[in-house]
């Protein structure tokens, strides 16, 4: 196994090396890898043979660095895929310092475990340790039985029970592993948690989701490849989403014109809350919600809004009739169509009687085609303007024609240099102004 350049230069005795977790399929190897690393670097699934390639997770501890090599489960192969996965495991085990064999506390030691234990004799270089996993799902009696069975299987450097889900004895396991590793500096920078590139990690997360959500529709032996990646706004390069200035100030004045000071404004799909902050500067209480944890975190650092919530607009954690203005701009067209009824119903639920709603989105109008809007791959819900008009006119929501006309004739402009209001500057915007009875 090729080792990266060492990058730790500590004078304190430091231990580092490679540890491979092995065992039958679905015994908790990937879950334990994630627990030791402290974040998700390996996908998990209730289905066996989820792991298809070796994954290096990097666990940085005070006394050492563990390079955890998560491997596919060893088994008696019945398919070509199984043969190749076993070959991958064998090539990995020949070069690691420690092999940690995992046994689920909920299942007795069986022929598959004995088969793997026998295979470990082929790798005399590595020390062998035994890890009884999933103790959170087992009784005390089961755990004791498993420890006895595993102890009798062979001579181990140590034997330890753990629960990766409950984080029980995970730190103790890390300390024991580090103590067995040879002294030496770290192989990776302390900020790194895996050597997997971003594209590979994303494709694996997609595969994890597919494995959990489908049953008979797709074969288990599936793979995911990414043809392209598009970064929407999870970065600070787009000033419209992350900056604050004249644009946001004038926009907030336009949308909230006539709203009494101190009103409650909710922004659905607020990104980091830069537009919402314009309402805050006008003296309103501001609450925003977005699905991106990154943007919500960024907004908490940059803007003094009253509350930013990370979550889905299908379940807004606010009381009924608690908001004076519901605002959502350039958001709904990025959300799957089957969620729209629930989202509009939530907007209406939190809005006070007499409260206002301002929705701005991209929609297909006369003379336009859907293809005109598909340059943005996040446009998953581009619909005719008639669809949106029918969608929002439900329950107790009514079109506020006067407010719409005020917007069209508004004196507020996106920039000082352009002699055009927002409606004129952005003719492709489709705007709905509504009021709740």
Image (tube, rainbow, N blue to C red):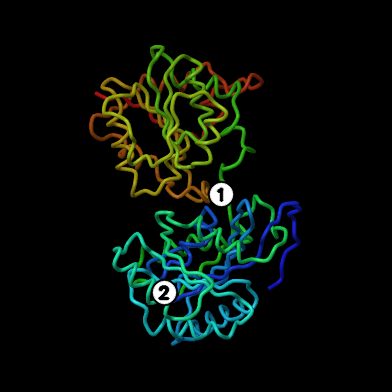
Choose mark 1 or mark 2, whichever is in front.
2
Question: Which quadrant would the N terminus be assigned to in this image?
Answer: bottom right
- Residue 253: image location, x then y, percent: 49, 17
Q: Which residue is mark 1?
A: 375
Front residue (pair 28, 343): 28
Quarter of the figure with residue 91: bottom right
Is residue 88 toward the left or the right of residue 318 in the image? right
Q: CA distance from mark 1 to mark 2?
A: 34 Å
Residue 227 in sight here: no
Tell me the element at label 1.
loop
* Relative height, residue 57 to residue 408 (above, below): below
Q: Which residue is mark 2?
A: 220
Residue drawn where x is 38% and y is 70% of the image:
104
**Which circle's residue, 1 or 2, is located before the other in the chain?**
2
Quarter of the figure with residue 226: bottom right
Is residue 261 toward the left or the right of residue 345 in the image? right
Is residue 146 toward the left or the right of residue 370 in the image? left
- Residue 223: image location, x then y, percent: 50, 71
Residue 418 in sight here: yes
* Relative height, residue 363 to residue 407 (above, below): below
């Amino acid at each position: 196994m090729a080792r990266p350049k060492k990058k730790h230069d500590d004078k304190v005795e430091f231990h580092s090396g490679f540890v491979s977790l092995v065992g039958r399929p679905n015994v908790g190897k990937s879950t334990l890898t994630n627990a030791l690393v402290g974040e998700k670097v390996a996908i998990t699934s209730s289905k066996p043979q989820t792991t298809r390639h070796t994954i290096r997770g990097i666990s940085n501890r005070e006394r050492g660095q563990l390079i955890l090599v998560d491997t596919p489960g060893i088994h008696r192969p019945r398919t070509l895929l199984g043969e190749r996965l076993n070959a991958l495991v064998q090539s990995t085990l020949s070069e690691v310092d420690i092999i940690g064999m995992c046994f689920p506390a909920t299942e007795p030691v069986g022929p598959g475990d004995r088969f793997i234990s026998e295979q470990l004799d082929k790798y005399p270089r590595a020390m062998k340790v035994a890890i009884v996993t999933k103790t959170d799902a087992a009784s005390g009696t089961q755990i004791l039985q498993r420890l006895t069975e595993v102890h009798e299987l062979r001579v181990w450097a140590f034997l330890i029970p753990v629960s990766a889900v409950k984080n029980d004895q995970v730190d103790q396991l890390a300390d024991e592993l580090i103590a067995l590793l040879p002294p030496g500096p770290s192989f990776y920078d302390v900020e790194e948690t895996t050597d997997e590139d971003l594209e590979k990690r994303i494709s694996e997360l997609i595969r994890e989701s597919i494995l959990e959500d489908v049953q008979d529709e797709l074969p288990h032996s599936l793979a995911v490849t990414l043809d392209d990646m598009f970064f929407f706004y999870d970065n600070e390069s787009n000033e419209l989403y992350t900056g604050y200035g004249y644009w946001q100030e004038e926009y907030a004045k336009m949308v909230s014109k006539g709203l009494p000071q101190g009103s409650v404004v909710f922004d659905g799909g607020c990104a980091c809350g830069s537009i919402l902050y314009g309402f805050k500067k006008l003296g309103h209480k501001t609450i925003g919600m977005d699905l991106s944890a990154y943007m919500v975190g960024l907004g908490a650092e940059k803007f003094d809004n009253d509350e930013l919530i990370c979550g889905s607009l299908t379940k807004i954690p606010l009381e009924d009739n608690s908001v004076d203005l519901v605002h959502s701009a350039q958001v709904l067209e990025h959300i799957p169509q089957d969620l729209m009824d629930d989202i509009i119903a939530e907007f209406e639920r939190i809005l006070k009687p007499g409260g206002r709603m301002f929705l701005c989105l991209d929609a297909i109008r006369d003379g336009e085609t859907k293809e005109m809007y598909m340059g943005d791959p996040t446009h998953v819900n581009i619909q005719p303007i008639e669809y949106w008009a029918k969608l929002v006119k439900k329950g107790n929501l009514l079109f506020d024609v006067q407010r719409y006309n005020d917007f069209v004739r508004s004196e507020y402009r996106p920039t000082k240099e352009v002699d055009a209001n927002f409606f004129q500057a952005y003719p492709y915007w489709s705007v709905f102004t509504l009021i709740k009875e």
